[in-house]
Image: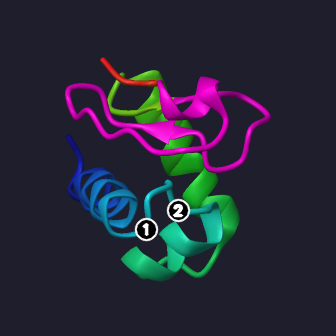
Amino acid sequence: MKERHEQIRDYIVQYTISHGWPPSVREIGEGVGLESTSSVQLHLKQMADAGIIKMVPGQPRCIAVPGVKITWEGDAECGKVSV
């Protein structure tokens, strides 16, 4: 796994634990030092393709990390995505 992907994965987990829902693309960028949301989107796509994260297309903040069970209130499809 790329170092940047590991940073993003860890940020998603910590943010979700702290806030009760996953971070937005902009928040991920701010959290890991990426200014461009396009760069964040590219990393997220690469991570989803590699199975590092799971995303629900078209749904903001619907990001889950396989192997890490974090539940939160909200959209059932988003909140239940875990492996």
Q: Position of residue 20 (x, y in %)?
A: 44, 58
Q: Which mark is residue 23?
A: 2
The quarter of the rendered structure image containing the N terminus is top left
Q: Position of residue 16 (x, y in %)?
A: 39, 58
Q: Residue at x 59, y 32 (%)?
A: 78
Query: What predominant SS class does the magenta segment belong to?
Result: loop
Q: Are marks 2 and 1 in contact (CB under 8 Å)?
A: yes
Q: Dot 2 lies on which element?
A: loop
- In the image, 72 versus 16, the foreground residue is 72
Q: Amino acid at mark 1?
A: His
Q: Residue at x 37, y 66 (%)?
A: 15
Q: Amino acid at mark 2?
A: Pro
| Mark 1 Cα shell of 10 Å, populated few (<14), some (14-19), many (≥20) | few
Q: Pointer 1: what residue? A: 19
- In the image, 68 versus 58, the foreground residue is 68
Magenta stretch holds residue 73: yes
Q: Position of residue 21 (x, y in %)?
A: 50, 55
